[in-house]
Amino acid sequence: MAGNGSERTLSHWNVVKVWKGINKPVFLTASLLIFGLLVFALIYGRSGGEAFDDLLGQIANGVGWWYVLIVTLFVVFALYCGISRIGSIRLGRDDEGPEFSLLSWFTMLFSAGMGIGLVFYGVAEPLSHYITPPEAGGIEGGTDAAVGQAMDLTVFHWGLHAWAIYVVVGLGLAYMTFRKGRPLSIRWLLEPVFGRRLIEGWLGHLIDTVAIVGTLFGVATSLGFGAEQIMAGLGYLGWAERSNWLILVLIGGITGIAVFSVVSGVYKGLKWLSNINMLMAAALMLFVLFAGATLFLMQSWVQNLGGYVSSLPDIMLRTAPLTDDGWAAGWTIFYWGWWISWAPFVGMFVARISRGRTIREFVAGVLIAPTLVGTIWFTVFGDSGILRQRQEGDMLVDGEVDANTSLFQLLGTLPVAGFVVTVTSVVAMLVIVFFFVTSSDSGSLVIDVLATGGDVETPRLTRLYWALLQGVAAALLLLVGGDSALTALQTFSIATAIPFSVVMVIACVALLRAFHYEANAMPRYVSVRPVGEAAELAASGMADAASPGAVATSSEPAASAAARRRRWNVSATFAGLDYPPVREAVAAAPEPVALAVTDIPTHAIQVDPETGAVSVDEEKTLTDPLGGEVFDTPEFDASAEGQAHRVDQLNNGGDCDAAAGTADDPVVPDAGGEAGPDDGQDPHDRGGTPGAQGR
């Protein structure tokens, strides 16, 4: 045992072995692009704080319409997959049920939805929309109408549209890995369109590179927001003031904790830390709920749900081409870019915990559960902030909403003792710190999985590299952004997500091709039994030998009887089919016979106009875009595709030992606390991560 542990440790730190194990085209290209973008930020940021504001406006004007359109299409894609026949496809083998109970699954989805973003914007966003609403809405700030619009827009940004982005990647990864047995990598989402050869070649490398760059800057954005709010909290308590040195100390220190977890493999402690963090976030929300205007918040939550549903058709495709207030760039377009850059990260986590569920269950759970959690969170914090501003008018700083300090201002206005305010402020900062650590640690693993083409047992050396690079990116963007630090973070989130947005659109097309084939090829099970005269004739052997159950009478012309016999080849009861196994089984069975029925496309059916004989044109039937491919991996052995491959080999008399594998779950990144197996080993050696919390 000691020897095995020693070998595993050496394999994590042996540079030569690590170098051989990485996907060099992806790793090197992604690294060069990231360093190039950071150099660009350093040079561009020297031209002044307004430089990033101008760049953000240019990028948003160029791609804003694209983001608004495709994210709404992602919602349509998700709903279509959940409502149509596609929804009955299981994310795994047909004989396996959900890996986690419904309650555990919802709890882990809740953890995925919680993060730095919710803490950062919980008070600030609704209050900002209330004070400074978008021109396109035509509502004056500070009015009663502005309250409803503020909450509608906030829930819009954190509701169905946000989670539909994660559905695309999470559903694709779960389907391709658990059902089709592909490696856990973004590139395989596009296999139904481009085929295996291109996906394993340069195109696959490009796809994973794009995903890595977007994910790294998405994580860096969250880390930057976290650092900004921690500094604001320290300043609010009078403990420290914002400075470049404080930025370096905070990001360096918290990144160091994440690096320690990567290096030491302290998984259990970090897993418990993640769970405790969730409890602290929930406790903070409940404290504000019951210490504040409880009845008002309960009423507001119900109204916010209704307002969101009724306003969705109006705002989901709003691009505001006639306005120049920059509202869309700073909010909607930024959010869609941020969510898209986080899609590989959160999508991998959501996929991991959803094995064994149907696509319908997946879509319903991933869209609805986090959206409801988001409405509760923003109602408690957002409506509390708006109510305080309407009653006392003390939630602004120099006439504007300060996103960094809004949360601490709200905590300071609650009717509790001073030391309680200090305690809750410290708790809020601890929540941010823990989200910071888990996001950095988990993000480095997800990026490393992509950099190795889906290898979930990634070496610590490369995870250390990505964790450090995330911290460097966050610190550099904050430092060069200066007073426009948040704008710098927003700019890079939107910009680096553009290429991956194209990948996601193609992934939707690819997945629909695979889903449509499987939905049509998937058998429907029917129960049949002999009925009427045809069954009695078949059972007694008195039927015509050419077509049992179709008997010519003396008054019927011979040609008509022959045509009638041929038409019996299409049957509603199966009793008269000219197929002895079916006929005999149905006639002799004491109980109804269960048969698997597969639909045939109408355009593939050919009917002889003279005889009525029916035949099937095989060339016009659907072709499996993923069929026939075999992988020598644990994921393939444990998938439905691998199971079907073994059955085919057995039926054909072949040797299935090479593909026998096991039925156990493949090892994939566990990014949700309790989601992974607890075998006492180092989880970083098996692809474990402490949490996918934080946007």
Image (spheres, helix red, strand yellow):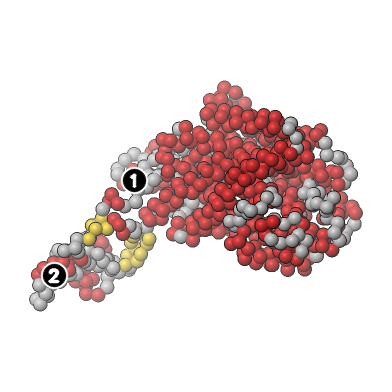
Q: Nearer the viewer, residue 13 or 653?
A: 13
Q: In x, y percent, where is residue 66?
A: 56, 48
Q: In x, y percent, where is residue 649?
A: 34, 43
For the point 48% across and 45% down, which residue is it? 506
Give the quadrant of the N terminus. top right
Asked whether residue 367 is in view, the answer is yes
Q: Is residue 591 above or below residue 113?
A: below
For the point 66% across and 57% down, which residue is it? 136
Q: In x, y percent, where is residue 384?
A: 78, 60
Residue type at the position of mark 1: Asp
| Residue at the outermost bottom position | 555
Q: Nearer the viewer, residue 12 or 505?
A: 505
Mark 1 or mark 2: which is in front? 2
Residue type at the position of mark 2: Ala
When asked about the image quadrant of residue 560, the answer is bottom left
Q: Could you say which disc has been placed on residue 648 in the image?
A: 1
Q: Which residue is mark 2?
A: 561
| Local secondary structure at mark 2 | helix
